[in-house]
Image (cartoon, coloured by chain):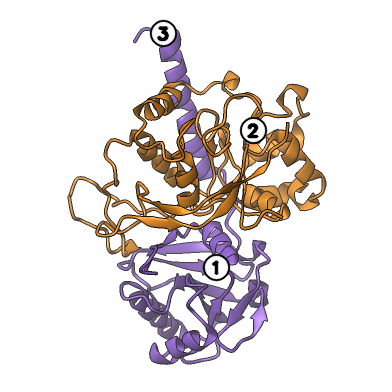
Chain colours: A purple, B orange
Amino acid sequence: MLMTKKNKIRCFFQIIFIFVLASRVFGENAVNLYSLDERWQDQNAKVSSLAQYKGKKIVFAMVYTSCQGACPLITKKMQKIFKQLSDKKPAVEFVIVSFDSDQDSIDRLKSFQTHMKLTGSNWHLLVGSPQSTRKLANLLDIKFAKRPKTNEIIHDNKILLFDEQGRLVKTLEGLGEDTADLF
Amino acid sequence: MRSQKLFVSGGAFIPQFGTNKNDPSVIVSDFWLDSHPVTEAAFRKFLKSHAEWRDEKNASNFSDEKFTSFWLRREPSPNRVYYPAIFVSWFAASAFCEANMGRLPTTFEWEYAARASATKKDGSADGELTAQILDWYAQPNSANALFSVFQGKPNAYGIYHMHGLIWEWTEDFNAFFAATDSRQEGDKNKDLQCGAGSLNGANRENYAAYIRYALRGSLRAKDTLSNLGFRCAYDQKK
């Protein structure tokens, strides 16, 4: 390949691209759940930041209550993890944050909790402002989009596991991944 | 010269992605938009009054090494004062707009305002506009490609440099779902995404829009680029 100026520039950018990719894999800090200071309201109307969960392991997901597709399956998967851990009795909190800041009221969160049989005081269903929701989703690399007119929300299916300091330790992507031996 | 908040009158349009195939139009409400991209000078002013953004630990949570290097470690160059602010992450851009009583424009708002040619608010029929945009995309990125935001000519809204200077963040830059593998028509990856939609763009001739959506969709909120900046939107003038 002739090292014309154009080819040198192309070569240069290909090398840069590879460095960018490499730095993404090797150079990043672990994401921390507590780096944002947003306020959330839970299904019992309690307002607080996520920092209240420091010191516990967290199993985390984002869903919305009127979701017809994967959200019930994500929630069931979280329940499976809950059952698997409950005999070991570790300090684990299950946190669900709603994508639907406009429609998911406290009442709807409470109904969802009952309907999905999420019993126990370590289930937390949270809703916040649209800005807080987008910030948190972006921090955790969870994509979502509200379709105009239908209010259907398209979103990534992920369950995230955090340690006691709030560091992301594992991501379960999609609905298929196994839940055994998580912590 | 200064950046102004310009009124963009709402209306319906068909965005390249993000709506249902059966009903592809979306209505954008009235909003205000910065006439110019945010400048280096404006962003440095923000950093002066927001100590948390000068903290390298915070910067590493919400941006990347290039942000830290460019904004926190290098001496500002007097030539660049009115250049668009670059090496800013989505978090940094959002924080700036919030501090200025605004927000990032949504992708629909940005694309709606970006349809304008020099003379028409809806320049989508203007083939020359698309050709000019594609000419810009075809140039290799180089340090000399940036210039003062106050140069150049505005579009029909009075807005400068929606094309031709930098890529721009939007509030929901990553909120567009194409299928993960395009080789199998109709194979929506239901496992990875709930409700993932069609990968067909609204207008197959609008190559410029495809490129913008691809660029924005490849970003994560912490990322920065040497040719990625932003401008702010507002829900009221004051």
Give, as a three-letter code, the residue at label 3: Met
Q: Nearer the viewer, mark 2 or mark 3?
A: 2
- Position above or below: B172 against A168: above
Using the numbered discs, state the Cα–Cα distance from disc 2 to disc 1 in whole angstroms: 38 Å
Q: Position of residue A143 (x, y in %)?
A: 44, 58
Q: Position of residue B197 (x, y in %)?
A: 29, 58
Q: Which residue is mark 3?
A: A3
Give, as a three-letter code, the residue at label 2: Pro
Q: Position of residue A113 (x, y in %)?
A: 45, 88
Q: Nearer the viewer, mark 2 or mark 1?
A: 2
Q: Chain of mark 1?
A: A
The 10 Å Cα crowd at callout 3, few under 14, some 14 to 19, many 20 or more, is few
The 10 Å Cα crowd at callout 2, few under 14, some 14 to 19, many 20 or more, is many
Q: Earlier in the sequence, mark 3 or mark 1?
A: 3
Residue contact between numbered discs 3 and 1, judged by CB atoms under 8 Å: no
Secondary structure, mark 3, is: loop
Q: Nearer the viewer, mark 3 or mark 1?
A: 3
